[in-house]
Amino acid sequence: MSEIYFIRHGQASFGSKNYDRLSEKGVLQAKILGRHIAFLGVRFDAICFGEMERQERTAKEMTNAYREQGIFVPKPVVDASFNEYDSALVWDFQTKMMLKDDPGLLDELEQDQTNKKAIEISWQVMSASITRIKYNSRNISLAGFNEITHLELTGDKTLLT
């Protein structure tokens, strides 16, 4: 089976003038990520990232880790399809559309705390985490979600953001 790696950018510079820039911790997270997956022998046919500065810097640090070990990586390609989006806006729009089709859904959504908790959990994606999808002509499956083993192995809990 083939595999697609989705890598979340390292920690952004929250509270600074340019939030889109990786923080020092974010740069370190990206370097650790790159070293780890290179060590595991993961090879890429293509590398793509969105137009955001933090996405580009994460890709740069990751590919630099490969090059430092003498491992070939393809030149990364910028693709706006990977830009972040406003998840709350998407959720609000989608909910309004669903309620238009089924007004009774509002009562169900308000009463079912399980749905609210599932939504909260689903948005907890860690900085510099890995999500893997395996696929072939017959199947597609989630092979890993929000993996941060590479950060946990450092023993530095402050890297878990």
Image (tube, rainbow, N blue to C red):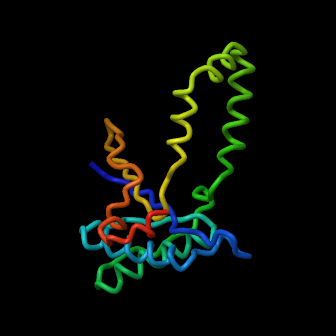
**Is 36 displayed left or right of 94 in the figure?**
left
Q: Nearer the viewer, residue 8 or 126?
A: 126
Residue 47 location (% of width, % of height)? 45, 67
**Is 104 displayed left or right of 159 in the figure?**
right
With respect to residue 116, does 81 lie above or below? below
Q: Residue 45 occupies which quadrant of the picture?
A: bottom left
Q: Residue at x 57, y 22 (%)?
A: 112
Q: Nearer the viewer, residue 40 or 80?
A: 40
Residue 42 location (% of width, % of height)? 29, 66
Q: Nearer the viewer, residue 76 or 27?
A: 27
Q: Residue at x 37, y 56 (%)?
A: 147
With respect to residue 125, does 72 lie above or below? below
Q: Residue at x 69, y 70 (%)?
A: 15
Q: Residue at x 66, y 17 (%)?
A: 105
**Is 65 displayed left or right of 100 in the figure?**
left
Residue 94 location (% of width, % of height)? 68, 32
Q: Residue 113 occupies which quadrant of the picture?
A: top right
Q: Residue 141 occupies which quadrant of the picture?
A: top left
With respect to residue 79, does 73 lie above or below? below
**Is 132 displayed left or right of 28 in the figure?**
left
Q: Nearer the viewer, residue 17 or 100?
A: 17
